[in-house]
Amino acid sequence: MMHRRGTLPILMIYLVMSNDVFADGWQKLHSRGAEVYYADEDLRKAFAEANPGALPEAKLKLPQATAPAFDWTKLIKAGHVHAQQGSICCWAYAVVSAFEWNWAIRNGSLKLPDLALQPILDRVQKDGIGYAGWGLEDLLEHGTCPAKSYRHVGKPARLRPGVKMPYRAVAWGMVAPPGGMPAVEQIKQALLDHGPLVANVYLTPAFKAYRGGIFAEHAKPPAGAPPTGHIVVIVGWDDRKGKEGCWKVQNSWGPRWGEGGFMWIEYGSNNIGHSACWVRAQSTFYDLPEGIHEEISPEADPFPHWPDAKEVDLPSPTDAPILTPTEALKRQGEQVVVQFPVKGGAINSFEGHVELFSEASWRDERCLIVRILKDDLAQFPAKSPRALLDRYRGKEIRVRGSVQTNPINIGNRPIIEVDDPDQIEMTK
């Protein structure tokens, strides 16, 4: 099936605190779920046009990122704070907490749902300190359920069969790909765009002992040590607190820690915000296209149908204007239809992808690169990468996809990644 093809705006890039977390490499994973992301984008826009004022964002009055303070807990009641107790799987607790916030924001709830994290632990089977990407991927593929529907253990156990998992993510991404420390301004904007964020922090005895007020330890890990050690959720900011401003953070150590389970921590203290991620929850206002879960992975479960969700008609992507490469290069992060004669090309010597150039060389600033991914070459009508390159070279092609920055090549030349023959057609 096909809705709109192309890579995400750096979605699905996992935490890169370890090079072996995902052995098959980010370039394969970062476009997983692109179909779902763009379908959700278009469906939400179409639903809003057909039902003015019905979506929660029509009623929310959010400030600009330049505002001196903002706090999601002032708009939505937290209701509960997860408590790890004896568990050391902070990554799962933080992921579910951020997901609860986004679910409430996107679906118009004034109170957070209390969701289970045990199904995630049971499927991922990772016990101990880990990476938020594990939980975010699992929410995208499988989802979770109300906490009352699934017994909590706090460490990986046997997955309970027959429990419905209606709470699903449709996308996740990093605030500042491919990782590291985002700027304060980036975190603020992401908080407004996506809601509370999963974020890393360097864990110290002083952090554990926090009881209230402004936390301003500014401790740094020893040379060669990991930059963090704990994962929390950033829910707001206040530039007037501390020396230069503070983040409001939700922890997962229960309501008796800190200020009812929350903390005010100075910007930059203890690497707070490192590898910050956002997550997008499925909407209960409209249905996703049937079978679209197959675009995520073969293991992904079908997306649930919510009782009041409506079917929304979408305009055909073929209605989009046909752009030149020069026009397309100005629309990075957008889905486009672009047409041009293939003047150059190459087989990427590192990854084995076939690349088609709108100019003779990718070094030309006017060049738009169309990349046919190595793992998808078998779908195309050619016996070898060289034969596929020769098939398109010198021909005029029309391509549908998302124009994105290319982080794996020198020069960061913009690209459109192609993983389906339907994305490319020869016009001449």
Image (cartoon, rainbow, N blue to C red):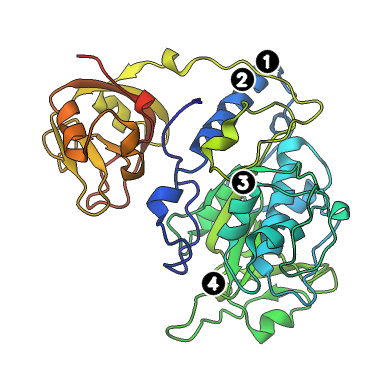
The local crowd at label 3, few if under 14, some if 14 to 19, many if 20 or more residues have their Cα within 10 Å, is: many
Q: Secondary structure at mark 1?
A: helix
Where, by quadrant of the figure, is residue 396 drawn? top left
- Closer to us: 335 or 134: 134
Q: Quadrant of the C terminus?
A: top left
Q: Which residue is mark 2?
A: 46
Q: Nearer the viewer, mark 1 or mark 3?
A: 3
Residue 337, relative to residue 213: is it above or below?
above
Residue occupying image coordinates x 79% and y 52%:
115
Residue 251: horizontal and vertical position, in percent? 73, 67
Residue 197 tag number: none
Q: Secondary structure at mark 4?
A: helix
Pointer 3 or 4: first along the chain: 3
Pointer 2 or 3: first along the chain: 2
What amino acid is labelled 2 in the image? Ala
Q: Nearer the viewer, mark 4 or mark 1?
A: 1
How many angstroms separate mark 4 from mark 1 (CA)? Answer: 44 Å
What amino acid is labelled 3 in the image? Glu
Q: Which residue is mark 3?
A: 141
Residue 62: horizontal and vertical position, in percent? 67, 40
Residue 271 tag number: 4
Q: Nearer the viewer, mark 4 or mark 2?
A: 2
Residue 243: horizontal and vertical position, in percent? 59, 71
What amino acid is labelled 1 in the image? Ala
How many angstroms separate mark 2 from mark 3 (CA)? Answer: 25 Å
Residue 59: horizontal and vertical position, in percent? 74, 31
Q: Which residue is mark 1?
A: 50
Q: Secondary structure at mark 3?
A: helix
Residue occupying image coordinates x 81% and y 62%:
81
